[in-house]
Image (tube, rainbow, N blue to C red):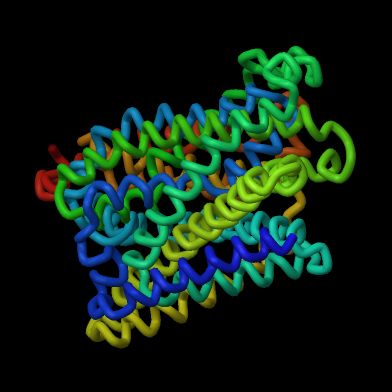
Amino acid sequence: MNLYAIVLGIIVITLLSVSLARLGKVKTKADYLVAGRSLPAFVLVFTLLSSWIGSGSLLGGAENAYRHGFGALWQAAGGWAGLLLIYFIAPRARKFAQFTIPDLLESRYNQTARLLGVIAVLFTYTAITSYQFIGGGDIIHLIFPGISSTHGAYILAGFVIVFTAIAGMGSVAYMDVVIGMLATITLIVALPVLIHLAGGWSGVHAALPASHFTAFGEIKPIAALELFLPTCLLMLGNQSMYQKFFSAKTERDATVAVGGWMIGTIILETVIVGVAVVGSALFRTGEVADHPREILAYTATHAFGGSPLLSILGALLVGAIFAKVVSTANNYLFSPATNLVNDVFVRYIRPEAGNGEILGVSRLMVVALGCWALLQALRIKSVLAMSLYAYTIYSAALTPVILAAFFWRRATAAGAVASIAAGTAVTVSWQYVAPHLPAVLAQRDAILPALILSLIGLVCVSLATPAPSEAKLRPFEG
């Protein structure tokens, strides 16, 4: 266990060093919120990869893979499909070059859309941050059994809040380069080693049900769609992603970064599911069977042994998982803090605020939202369920109007407001409404009803109201 502690200590010190090194470069609002619009394609690839692959994949996706095998890739495939479309959005987003998604909503629609967008982002991103805290707490508990998962979540939250508050987007992005390289190399090396330890691919097959190796496994097609759609739509409208595009040096850097991000995401998410499936073959019973979200970290701490090299690989794998959780938490905590500062404080409370005041308030918002996310984390029962809830809010409330801003000239402010309001309301209230509906609806997740009502609101209200002016449309056209 000392080896695991040493690796985690080195990672924490390295990340803190990167943050402190970037601190002196933060002097203005643009430096803090979008890294002074200076990120090259290489940095963008790793910060996009690290912000996307976090506890949703490492815990929720791995839990799904433990239970259902390779059918869990339906969740990851939603992101891959989204990336194909993002290739065409990235240069337009960099050309627009604001600070947040609500900036985009007000520019294309109106102030009401902006405020509703802030609310949807706050619900979604603090929920995503909350289960990163749970993931980090689980890892700390596995390495230090004397520390409970709950206390581990407190510790992880403290790390993340400090890292995120120090230097903003520049800090987050350059930490992601270190984390992305560590995770990519370690996971790719670990998978074939684990297959060997499980007795080869034939040994993995022999230990698991045949359904684990089919396209759907035990997941029904409608359930696969409920995994695919929220992930795809979150990817398409992800504010953290757009902020990275706004931070790019040029439109070309943004476009090139998407190609590298696509390759890295397909490889890493497939490897993560592969490691979880092999881990499930190695550990079908015991503690991890009761807590399958821990399968990756549990495999890293229990499967590797017998030689110093294997022990080091196991420690590095734990460290990589921990670092990815920290990275995703950084990104999803920083993003809503940006909204409160840019879209509320500067926009409505203190328009005349100077750079020093904005930086101070930004850091206070990181702390406040970090505490809120921690409170949510203490109530989580299933990381997979929480991730799908968070994805659905964003997918139904914001992705349709974001895509319409770039690709549907007829979308109007009134249509956008109706769409955001419907998507948010249905998702947040679904757990209370669904039990009173017919069984065929009550058993389903919120994504389909929320998305359908959101699209109806966008299309019908837009067509019933006057078309937007050319001035509104011009900044969003290629």
Viewer-proximal residue among 108 and 74: 74
Can see residue 261?
Answer: yes
Quadrant (top left, top right, bottom left, bottom right) of the N terminus: bottom right
Decide if residue 469 is on the left or right side of residue 334: left
Q: How many numbered badges does the structure rendering display?
A: 0
Residue lying at 40% horizontally and 32% vertically, measured from the top left: 82
User: Up-down: is 445 above or below 383?
Assistant: above
Quadrant (top left, top right, bottom left, bottom right) of the C terminus: top left
Which of the two residues, 437 or 474, is positioned nearer the viewer here? Answer: 474
On screen, residue 69 versus residue 290, left or right, reads left
Percent coordinates x, y for residue 402 in the rendering: 33, 43
- Front residue of 131/149: it is 149
Name the spot of residue 27 as percent of width and height, x first: 24, 80
Kindly indicate the quadrant of the structure image that contains residue 259. Answer: top left
**Quadrant housing residue 233:** top left
Q: Residue furthest front?
A: 307
Task: Please tell me which residue is depicted at 46% across the width and 76% down the height of the picture.
Answer: 365
* Residue displayed at 66% across by 54% down: 135
Q: Residue sitting at 79 percent across and 68 percent down?
A: 147
Q: Where's residue 428, x and y in %?
A: 61, 50
Residue 469 at x, y percent in the picture: 13, 46
> Which is more toward the observer, 151 or 105?
151
In the rendered image, is residue 427 in sight? no
Quadrant hosting residue 26: bottom left
